[in-house]
Structures are given as structure tokens and as C-alpha cells.
Image (cartoon, rainbow, N blue to C red):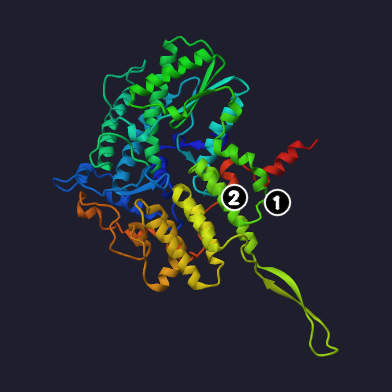
Amino acid sequence: MTENTKNILSLNHTEAMDFFLKSEQYHGFELPEYFVFDDLLQNVKNAVGKTPYEECLQEGMSPEQLSDVNLDILLNKDGRYAVRPIILANPFLYYFLVREICNEQSWTVVKQLFETFTVPHITSCALPVIPKTKEPFHKSTTILNWWNTLEQRSIELSLDYRYMFVTDITNCYGSVNPQAFDWAFSFKDTEFEQKTKNPIAKNIQKFLRAFQQGRNIGIPQGSAIFDFIGEIILGYSDLLLHEAIKREGIKAPYEIIRYRDDYRIFCNDKDELEKISYILQHVLESLNFRMNSKKTKISDSIVTDAVKPDKLAYIYNTPIFNKKGCDFDSFEKHLLYILLFARQYPDSGSIKTMLSDIDKRIEDWLKPYEEEVTTIPIIEGGKPKTEKVMKQRRLIGGSIRAMSAVCAQIALENVSCCHYALRVFSRMVDSLKDEKEKSAIISLVYSKLCNQPNSDYNQLWLQNMTYQRDKKKGTSPYKVRLCRVVAGDKNVELWNNGWLKPQFLSDLHANGIIDEKTLKKVTPVITFRERRAYDNQFYLPTEEEIRKSETIATF
């Protein structure tokens, strides 16, 4: 963490509950700004309160028996067959899980748990971090924490160590063995082992089965609370690893940094480093985890291997994207470059940076500009008249239809970056004067992106672009349940709550997740909260921080 950043464990139990019940923690993936879940979660909290879970169930019913308990969103990772499932969790089950973790007694146990998991020479830096204020862009505090505690710290350790072992866990959350919660809470196979089982572990297992239609494997993805309980298992693995290294008598100095399921191990002795890597493999295997062989290696070039390959490629090509201009003479060439880069580094953070760069370039190019125009009168003896006229440039280097096709392909193949690609697309199309051509291009892009399986995320952002147009027509082409809520359908059931007693559902209104004021301000050009995307990769100091540093440096 950065010096002034606090993590979730710095909060008391009521503060921790409030943190997890915030909209931005409820959905870890970015949504259009008019989706806000604070009121919904508060209504659930008020309705349920301290009522025991079992007393909220309809007789003979359980969420494990039902489908569509959560709102599932499958992200197409490669535009083909690889998918990453995320969920918009059932708000009642979400509240029950948060309440289980954050009641006063449980929170004391959980904090003590992580204290025990904190061991010498192993640093975990993935606990949820607390934003100081409203975040300038989605998950900015988390991104900055990752940059400081993993990437920057790794580069710093290159001064102390010669070698670095890198690996991560294949399908980490999907592979979690629920029984491991019993082991973690009782510190099984460690010097702190307890004979009694903790009821918190059993309740976590119960709610995980409820989220997953009775499946007794894995942890869902999509919310901060799931990341947190995942850290319970991974923190336990840190303790197991520490004690195993001690038992093996490793003498060489070493340092381990773990960010969620990403591991970096530093050592000056290559043989000892390999021993530690085998110990780690054994520990992970005991918890049903597997190392990702494609991402596992020993490096003697720590500085460069500490940085993501896509970021290095972006840095290497910085002259192309210099902040004073662009070396591409057309927007289409620029977009094609991004498409090719994205195929080499799919769904990477640098794609967002590049798409933000070209979006800013297009935005600046399309700004109206003032030009002096001189008119020479036809009448003999008349004086020339000079006046200032506002003009607007047209996009150069390819038709907007062709460039829209490139944007659509980028969005199709890089779903986590689709809103960045679609923002560029929306800005280009909005610059057209021909309304028929606008409609034609939008329809073609819609067909390309939405007439395929697992297109929910693309539809959410396309609707952000076409909302005003759809409203005028009085129709909406989007079938995704969240999109139907945006379109004003008051009969949409986002979650199957047939397992709950009816009295708890009276204040649950799906339409309450839409901020109407924000929705009214939606334009044909997609917007979302964002500082310059460069900030996603590197921390840029504020003007105040720069002034302070200049003052300190003055002598």
C-alpha cells in the first residue's frame, strides 16, 4: 500500500459493513454511471436487519435449488470461446455474506486471522483498500495500490536480489476448495492449529453454495467481498508457505510479494529460489490450486520482468503516442495499430491507455475552431470584408464507417476494454451530419457485437450511446435485463428471489438502481469517470504535490 492508503482491516466492523455495501464495491467491473446500487443495498439491509438467514427462507425453499439467483454476465475474453464469468450478486445473499463477515464478533476473529497470516518475508498487498474520497476513475485506488506495492516494489527489490521467480494460479477463484475455510480458520497444519471448528467458516461455505446453485467449489467473481474471502484462503497459504520454508531450512535471504494469485519471489541464490518455488507448488497443490505453467519462470532481468509486457510495449512505442502530437497521419492507421497491439496483448490495461489517447486526439481534432474569412465584394469600389467564422474539421484518413468497423473489432476481441473502444466509435459517429448514415453504422455495429453469445457487457455500453435515440423512437433493441431496466421496463426481475419470504421484498424495486438525473444527461458520446488513462498505469502527482516538492527542493 501507499504510505497514506488504508486497507479494510483498519476499519471497525460497522465501517467495514458500510464499505462493502457501497455500490462501487458491490460491482467490481465498470458499468455506465447511471447504475447506482447504494439505495438497493440499503433497502435490503433495512428489510433484513439482524433476522437470521434461515428465518428469511420460504418453507422448503433454498436459493441452492433455483437458477438465476444472481445476474450472470459472461465476458468473452477473446471474442471467441474463452469466457470469464462474473456476477451481479443477489443483493440479499450479498448482504447475508457481508453481515456474516462484518458482525462485531466475526470481524474480531477475521482481523485476528489476518494478523496470524502476516509473516516475515511474505507481503500480501491485495486486501481491499479504502479510497480517501470519490475515486477519479473506476478502481483508481486499487490500481494505484497494485502499482506501488507490486510493480514498484518489485523494481526496488532488484537492487537487493539477482533473481525473481514469477507465477500465478490457474483459475484461482474457480478452484477454491470450500473446506479450506475450515482449515484457514483453525490454522490447520500450522503451529497455531486449533482443534475446534469456527462457525464463520461453515456459514461462508453455506452462502457460497447459495450463490452457486449448490455447487461446492469455487468463489464467485464480481464484488469486493468475494476478493476479501478469497484473501482468507490465500492468506492461509502464506502462513503454510512460511512454515514450510522454515522446515526446509532455507538459509538464503528471500522476499515474497503476493498480489491475489500473483507471486513474485526474490533471491540471490538460484538453487534456493527453485527450492522455494517447489515448496510453493506443494502448498498450492494442498489447497487444490495449480501454478499457471505459461506464466511461470525465473528471471535475472527483474526491472523489465517486474513490469507487464503490454506496458513495456507501450513505453517502447511512446514516440508514436507522444503527448504533443501523433506520428500517425490518419486516425484509421492509429486504430489499426491499436487492434494489432490488442491481438498481441489482449484485454490489457495498455489498450485502455491507447484508446484514451486516440479518443482525446479525435476530440481535439473535432473541436470547432475560428478562422478569418475575407469576402471581396462584386461591386466595383467595395471594400473587402473580413470576419471570423467557426469551422469544424472532418476526420481524416479513412471513412467513419471503416474506422467504426475497426473499433467494433477491438471491442469484440477485448471485452473488458469495450467501453473505451465504443467511446471512440460513439465520438466518430456523432460527428456525422447525415442521420441516415449514423443510424446505418450504429445498426451494423450493434449486429456485429450483440448478435452473438455472451454479449451482455457490450450491450450495456452500446445502450449508453443510443439511449436518447431509442427514447425518441419509443423502442429499445436491447434484451439484457439491466438494459431493460434502463429503458424503463418496470416488470424486470433482475434476481430470482423466490426463496425469500415476501415481506422482505416489498422495498426491492429494480428501477431504483438507475440514477435518473445521470441518465437524463446521457449523450450520444459515451462518458465515464476517468482521469487521463495514463494515470491507470503510473501515478502522476497533483499540482499541490508538485508545489510542495518544489518548495522542499529549494535551497
Which mark is drawn over residue 324? Answer: 1
Residues at marks 1 and 2, CA–CA distance in whole angstroms = 15 Å
User: Up-down: is 125 above or below 540?
Assistant: above
Residue 533, how many percent across, how many down?
57, 48
The amino acid at mark 1 is Lys
The label nearer to you, 1 versus 2, is 1
Which mark is drawn over residue 146? Answer: none
Residue 146, how many percent across, how many down?
52, 36
Residue 391, how many percent across, how many down?
67, 71
Q: Is residue 342 left or right of residue 209?
A: right
What residue did someone put label 2 on? Answer: 532
Q: What residue sits 29% from the left and 60% below the top?
A: 492
The earlier-in-sequence mark between 1 and 2 is 1
Q: Mark 2 Cα within 10 Å, few/some/many (few <14, many 20+)?
A: some
Q: Is residue 35 visible?
A: no
User: Up-down: is 133 above or below 161?
Assistant: below
The amino acid at mark 2 is Arg
Mark 2 element type: loop
Q: Residue furthest left?
A: 60
Q: What residue sits 34% from the left and 57% below the top?
A: 480
Q: Is residue 550 visible?
A: yes
